[in-house]
Amino acid sequence: MIDRWFRDHPRSVGESYAEHLGVATSFGARLIAGGVACMIHGLLPNLFTRTGSNTVKRLYSQMVARQPGSPPPAYQQPEWRPEYEI
């Protein structure tokens, strides 16, 4: 039971429970910070003009880099251009 709840998934991604806890907590904290920056940006548009977009791009790049054989992030390809950034 303990293996199923606490160890199976971390092992499947090549991490110990503690390593997975650290990575997941780090990603979650940065998502929260980026989300708060987006909400502040909604109220005060001149603040945090690229924080949300940059947070998502950075986290996506890090997540893709952890998966061997994955293509580069779409935003790094010249043909991909967003209409706007958050």
Image (spheres, rainbow, N blue to C red):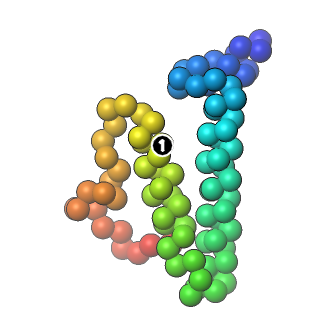
Q: Is residue 81 above or below residue 59?
A: below
- Residue 48 on image: x %, y %: 57, 77
Residue at the image point whose x is 68% and y is 53% from the top? 29
Q: Quickly name the residue at label 1.
A: 63
Task: Report x, y in % for residue 54.
Answer: 48, 64
Considering every residue shown, the one lying at the far left of the view is: 79
Residue projecting furthest to the right: 2
Query: In the shown orientation, is residue 45 left or right of residue 25?
Result: left
Picture quadrant of residue 10: top right
The quarter holding residue 34 reads bottom right
* Residue 76 appears in the figure: yes
Is 39 placed above or below 61 here? below
Residue at (50%, 58%) from the top-left corner?
56
The location of residue 77, given as percent across then percent down, is 26, 57
| Between 38 and 17, the one nearer to me in the picture | 17
* Quadrant in the picture for residue 44: bottom right
| Quarter of the image that includes the N terminus | top right
Query: So how many labels did they put on this image?
Result: 1
Question: Judging from the image, what secondary structure is the residue with disc 1 in?
Answer: helix
| Residue at point 59%, 83% (across, down) | 47
Say which residue appears at 63% left-offset and 56% top-offset: 30
Decide if residue 9 is in sight here: no
Q: Is residue 49 above or below residue 65?
A: below
The amino acid beneath tag 1 is Met
Label 1 environment density (alpha carbons within 10 Å; few <14, some 14–19, many ≥20): few
For residue 76, above or below residue 5:
below
